[in-house]
Amino acid sequence: MDLDTKSGKKNSYTSLDINHFYESITSKSKLKDDKTFLHKNSILIQSDVLNKNNFEKEIFDLIITSPPYNVDIKYNSHKDDLTYEEYLDFSEKWMKNCFIWTKSQGRFCLNIPLDKNKGGQKSVGADLTLLAQKIGWKYHSTIIWNEGNISRRTAWGSWLSAAAPYVIAPVELIVIFYKDEWKKTYGSKISDISKDEFMEWTNGLWTFNGESKKRIGHPAPFPIELPYRCIKLFSFVDDIIFDPFAGSGTTLIAANNNNRFSIGLEIDQKYFELAKQRIINETTLLL
């Protein structure tokens, strides 16, 4: 696979030399072998996204991720009830690392809440969008994800009174950023999106159900439809897809099954093992 961001050559690695690919992009000496899982065209690494030494160069074509929302979800290895200032500091650090690791024409699909009310009203979507731009990410657009299976309860605050009503929007955001240039001029230049998909998905309102926590075995999974659409719309065949919060491995599965290479980081041992098993069970070799 060509890792030179100035090169227009088609990627050339296959799953047979995924080990060589891994060695070429990581600080392998800083990672233990049992912390790395290589399968077909996916690489899963048990490591913290805050570790600046995870990768040695600009390698990613597209980042797709859903970071912790800071709403007190009971993860094993992440404290999800930070103060809002701590949460913004954490967000700045990981988004800055991702910026460093991304190619000049790389894109970034960030799935985040529009806002949050637990612990006080916070404009999470707006604040993280501004923070990403402060780091250097350039803003392109925002997709509104209407989750068809989340609560429609609206009777919050003062019932039938203007005293203190709450407005709850049953949507999340997928904010699209890029690093230096929006137009992609390198890579395979092979798109596999259909006309109908392109017409539907370039409408910035996406409606599909969320994912079942019980079915996946993770407290905050997103549905495979989300990375599937982002991968086909914003990347070429053979591109390198990255998820810094791999969780249950959904992004890697979607990438592998759509002729892309994928790399994921997951800090927690339990979720790392869960993602491994899902990658083994749910990926097909297409490249």
Image (cartoon, helix red, strand yellow):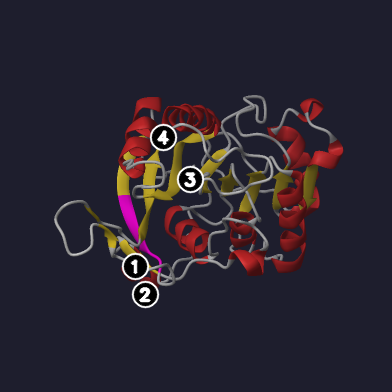
Quick one: label 3, few (<14), some, or many (20+) residues within 10 Å? some
**Nearer to us: label 1 or label 3:** 1
Q: Which residues are magenta?
A: 142-147
Mark 1 or 2, which is nearer the eye? 1
Is residue 200 shown above or below 114?
below
Q: Which residue is mark 1?
A: 153
Q: CA distance from mark 1 to mark 2?
A: 33 Å
Task: From the top left corner, tell me how far across and down residue 167 is, in percent.
Answer: 25, 56
Q: Residue at x 51, y 34 (%)?
A: 82
| Amino acid tagged 1 | Arg
Q: Tell which circle, 4 or 1, labels the residue nearer the N-terminal end.
A: 1
Marks 2 and 4, how far apart in space? 28 Å
The N terminus lies in which quarter of the figure? Answer: top right
Q: Earlier in the sequence, mark 1 or mark 2?
A: 1
- Mark 4 highlights which residue? 179
Q: Residue at x 65, y 46 (%)?
A: 263
Answer with mark 2 or mark 4, whichever residue precedes in sequence. 4
